[in-house]
Image (spheres, rainbow, N blue to C red):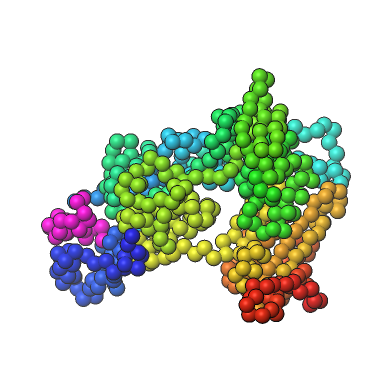
Amino acid sequence: MASAATLTDMRLPLSSAKMLRNLSTKFSSSCSLIPIPLYSTSTLHFSRRFHSFSWRRFTARAAADGGIENGAWGDIQHFDFDLFTIGAGSGGVRASRFAAGYGASVAICELPFATVSSEKTGGVGGTCVLRGCVPKKLLVYSSKFSHEFEESHGFGWNYETEPKHDWGTLMANKNAELQRLMGIYKNILKNAGVTLIEGRGKVVGPHTVDVDGKRYNAKHILISVGGRPSIPDIPGKEFAIDSDAALDLPSMPDKIAIVGGGYIALEFAGIFNGLRSDVHVFIRQKKVLRGFDEEIRDFVSEQMSLRGIEFHTGESPQAILKSADGLLSLKTDKGTVGGFSHIMFATGRRPKTMNLGLEDVGVKLDKNGAILVDEFSQTSVPSIWAVGDVTNRINLTPVALMEGGAFAKTVFGNEPTKPDYRAVPSAVFSQPPISQVGLTEEQAIQEYGEVDVFTANFRPLKATLSGLPDRVFMKIIVCACSKKVLGVHMCGEDSPELIQGIAIAVKAGLTKEDFDATVGIHPTSAEEFVTMRTPIRKIRKAQQPLEDDKAWHLKPAVEA
């Protein structure tokens, strides 16, 4: 694999370089052309730019003059585009329009739209816009009203009749919004000068993409096809639904089993619970949200249980059974639970790399089908790149956007740029929601050793009148030596909105003293982040003999 460092050392073919020097003598000295080391397909940069001369135009002129030697780009003598992107999701659209902004000619292909994705359907906008973040959040908004109706009674509101929810109205309005957003994405591409091609793209060569039988040659190919939900191969799996289908059901579930303990499972558990379905969550582990901070995992499970969601922990699904009345039962290694109208699997997603032709042209994949890339998103084939969930790095939409932008800068902007994965914030839109940035307590101890932990667990002001058992949990993890804030975590209403702002502070490397010196906004939950003065615990390395260098202990917190 050619590293990005070697990209900056690429030189023009000898005959092309001579041609450029000859051309430069034809212009006045005030517009002298002094090439800067560049990528093989980037816009040509000069110390003084001469209007809109680009590498693309120079190569076209050189080819007409016979100046570019055969083999400079392999066996291909003509490229239809500088960049051909397969997959018009968040990362692909960002990379394509940024590349076009640098002067590259760009095409992007995407499958026809459908609310549920398949090998033959997709849609401009990708998973996040069409069957992920956006429709999911719309359903979260809808489901939260039932809790707000309950809260309102303590504030003097009474209803003569119980509010009723109409699933059909929600689905129709949600789908109308998806169509609007898809139109916006198409206009973004059009306005950027990107050619949109509808169809299934397949890589058939290092520089060649086949779209439903028509072939296109490009100097660079970008793969940004994302991933799809995965359902384990167990008897009766044909009766199960995944997250795609759950966002577009013809009717609301009466009783639903959700298999999985990750963020998708918890988000849908909150949605269907809020819409007053009977919700059961089955997880193989003892706790939900593996990889999240341990205290957050415990707290969110407790809060969701108080809202009526039943958790079945330590149970592995073995089969789905369908009875004569159409109801479903889930058989696990601990027994069988029945009476479900729907059984949903939220047990992970897999990259959509099957039948893309990648391995045939030498692109290396991992055991799960994710594309292996270097730190600049370049694959094992130098002309093929990949961003987003298909690489299985950090599978978040804003990260795919960052990777797409970094790719465009690297390849077409003459600015080698690595995606920066430090302090990436994230959220789980469960009910209550979770948000975090930086390290968990467990990660901080592993990486820094000695840390101070600050927590707050309180009843928010709104709950004092609502009478509901809602609580908020906040946590700050601090390096004991430098006082730098290493991680911030929250579970409670509006936590994603709060942590987005806190993420700036963590990314900037601010200290606990900086937090303490900040004036709070009262009365808010957010002010707790700047008023936590006393650590709940201090983790210190025990004074043990050198051979027992891994011993640790907790010191009691001292009043600050």
Q: In the depicted view, which residue is nearer to us: 363 or 234? A: 234
Q: Write down the quadrant of residue 174 in the picture.
A: top right
Q: Write down the quadrant of residue 418 in the picture.
A: bottom left
Residue 264 in the magenta stretch? The answer is no
- From what the image shows, is residue 454 above or below residue 184? below
Taking the spot 64% from the left edge, 33% from the top edge, the residue there is 343
Quadrant into which the C terminus falls = bottom right
Would residue 519 appear left or right of 191 to someone viewing this image? Answer: right
Taking the spot 64% from the left edge, 57% from the top edge, the residue there is 292
Answer whether residue 172 is visible to the viewer in this image: no
Q: Write down the quadrant of residue 134 in the picture.
A: top right
Q: Position of residue 265 (x, y in %)?
A: 64, 44
Query: How many numbered circles does the render carry?
Result: 0
Taking the spot 69% from the left edge, 49% from the top edge, the residue there is 286
Residue 60 in the magenta stretch? The answer is yes
Residue extending farthest top: 324
Q: In the depicted view, which residue is nearer to us: 390 or 40? A: 390
Q: Position of residue 435 (x, y in %)?
A: 65, 57
Q: Position of residue 17 (x, y in %)?
A: 18, 67
Q: Position of residue 364 (x, y in %)?
A: 37, 52
Q: Which residues are magenta?
A: 55-76
Residue extending farthest front: 547
Residue extending farthest left: 66
Taking the spot 47% from the left edge, 47% from the top edge, the residue there is 368
Q: In the depicted view, which residue is nearer to us: 537 or 463? A: 537
Q: In the depicted view, which residue is nearer to us: 434 or 345? A: 345
Quadrant into which the N terminus falls = bottom left
Answer whether residue 211 is visible to the viewer in this image: yes
Would residue 28 appear left or right of 362 to someone viewing this image? Answer: left
